[in-house]
């Protein structure tokens, strides 16, 4: 038998036991933390964009610049008649059940609609008057 001189002894530094991914290194928790932080940043950016859009439009959009609701009156449970001013024209619209119908169109009058009576204020004034009379 010939002596074998080319074989090197195996040292402990060359042998490594296989490890499951992320075990012992803390990589699993780091990845979860990064994922959570990324999601929080994305959701925060979405809310920031909505806030900026709301501030730029002042919450009204472009329609408010070109038209104005002059008057509105309920005529049923879900139906109403609305007078909308568009430039120098008033549109009388019927609104209900997801539909809008043009009922009439007229030029904008020189004088606005007369001031409507605030029934809540007149009721409150009458009630306080009656209470003060009953106390005397």
Image (tube, rainbow, N blue to C red):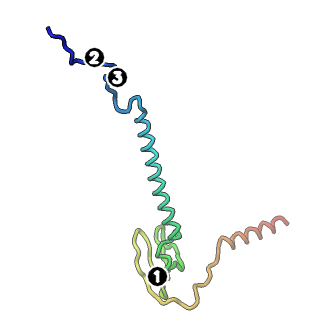
First in sequence, mark 1 or 2: give its number: 2
Nearest to viewer (mark 1 / mark 2): 2
Picture residue at 44% right of the left edge, 53% below the top = 42
**Residue 127, label in figure:** none
Write down the residue under mark 2: 9
Q: CA distance from mark 1 to mark 2?
A: 99 Å
First in sequence, mark 3 or 1: give its number: 3
Q: Which of the 4 quarters of the picture holds residue 25?
A: top left
**Label 1: element kind:** strand
Query: Which of the pair 7/61 is nearer the observer?
Result: 7
Nearest to viewer (mark 3 / mark 1): 3
Query: Which of the pair 47/22 is nearer the observer?
Result: 22
Write down the residue under mark 1: 92
Write down the residue under mark 3: 13
Return the residue found at the far bottom: 110
Q: Which of the 4 quarters of the picture holds residue 127?
A: bottom right
Q: Is residue 132 left or right of residue 73?
A: right
Residue 46 versus residue 13 in the image, above or below: below
Query: Are the residues flagged by discs 1 and 2 in contact, CB closer than 8 Å?
Result: no
Residue 70 versus residue 39 in the image, above or below: below
Residue 120: x %, y % from top left: 66, 70
**Label 2: element kind:** loop
Residue 136: x %, y % from top left: 85, 66
Nearest to viewer (mark 2 / mark 3): 2
């Amino acid at each position: 038998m010939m002596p074998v001189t080319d074989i090197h002894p195996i040292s402990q530094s060359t042998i490594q036991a296989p490890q499951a991914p992320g075990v012992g290194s803390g990589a699993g928790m780091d990845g979860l933390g990064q994922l959570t932080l990324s999601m929080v940043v994305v959701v925060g950016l979405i809310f920031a964009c909505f806030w900026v859009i709301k501030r730029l439009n002042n919450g009204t959009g472009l329609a408010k610049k070109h038209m104005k609701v002059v008057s509105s009156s309920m005529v049923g449970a879900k139906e109403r008649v609305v007078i909308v001013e568009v430039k120098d024209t008033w549109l009388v619209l019927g609104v209900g059940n997801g539909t809008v119908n043009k009922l009439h169109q007229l030029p904008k009058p020189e004088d606005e609609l007369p001031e409507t009576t605030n029934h809540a204020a007149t009721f409150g004034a009458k009630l306080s008057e009656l209470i003060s009379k009953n106390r005397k």
